[in-house]
Amino acid sequence: MKSEILKLLNVKRGWIYESILSFSINGKAKVMPMGFFTDDMENIGISIYKTSKILEDLLSKEIFVINLTSDVKFFYQSIFERDKLKFLSTKSNEPYIDGVDGYLELKLDRVVETADKKILISEIKDYELFSKDTRLINRASHLSLEALILVTKLPYLSLETKKWALKSLNEYERIVKKVAPNSEYGKIVDALRKFSKTI
Ligand SMILES: Cc1cc2nc3c(=O)[nH]c(=O)nc-3n(C[C@H](O)[C@H](O)[C@H](O)COP(=O)(O)O)c2cc1C
């Protein structure tokens, strides 16, 4: 069992962490930023929009890599500057991004369909961690901080800007509750929403 890595990474059940998926197809490395989660601390779920062009390749491949990094540069490059990424090979010869903190190698187990997404549930076949203090990005802490900053600005905003700020606050709340269900961050954004109504 390779799932002990999830505890090492301090992954919490049901929370969504940002990562970059990579795999090779016809000898070419494909990359795609993607959130991942675990519902059972064993298997990994990734939820992909059915419109994604990479989905078919991924389903035919069945083996792929989740790159572990908190460096936003790699996320940016994965979409806009793919030629700047360098790849190394996992033990079973799949590509991972040179410079990341580690990777998980996954094998697709099953696919669950929703209206607009396919949820790929995969087993962890292997992993390597190159850094002891690998921290994954979960968006909840930064978004609740952004929400806090926004709320401190509310009293000074024009009516129109305030409307925009309250919309943003709603959106932050939605994301926080999606990526970190039942968390302290959810309680913070709840309290901030209540507070925003008093201003
Ligand atoms: C940080 C980050 C996380 C993402 N997470 C997901 C995700 O969980 N599911 C998804 O379908 N797309 C996600 N995306 C969008 C895909 O990466 C994007 O649609 C993809 O790169 C485009 O691939 P395509 O050309 O195959 O459509 C995410 C993008 C970023 C930057």
Image (tube, grey):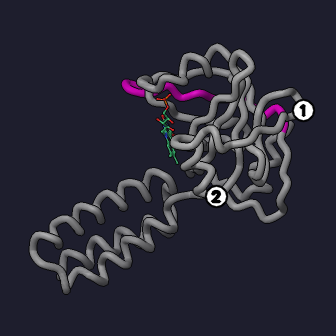
The tally of labels here is 2
Most extreme residue toward the right is 91
Q: Please, is residue 148 above or below residue 19 in the view?
A: below
Amino acid bearing label 2: Asp
Q: Which residues are magenta?
A: 114-126
- Find residue 161 and report its image quarter: bottom left
Element type at marker 2?
loop
In front here: 84 or 134?
Answer: 84
Q: Quadrant of the N terminus?
A: top right
In front here: 16 or 74?
Answer: 74
Where is mark 2, residue-wise? 71
Q: Residue 34 lies in magenta, yes or no?
A: no
Amino acid bearing label 1: Lys
**Residue at image location 59% in from the left, 27% down from the top:** 120
- Find residue 111 and report its image quarter: top right
**Residue 153: x %, y % from top left:** 27, 82
Where is mark 1, residue-wise? 91
**Residue 178: x %, y % from top left:** 44, 51
**Residue 94: x %, y % from top left:** 79, 29
Main SS type for the magenta part? Answer: strand
**Residue at image location 68% in from the left, 33% down from the top:** 22
In front here: 33 or 194?
Answer: 33
Label 1 environment density (alpha carbons within 10 Å; few <14, some 14–19, many ≥20) = few
Q: Are marks 1 and 2 in contact (CB under 8 Å)?
A: no
Q: Please, is residue 56 above or below residue 69 in the view?
A: above
Decide if residue 14 is in sight here: no
Q: Quadrant of the C terminus?
A: bottom left
Q: Residue 117 lies in magenta, yes or no?
A: yes
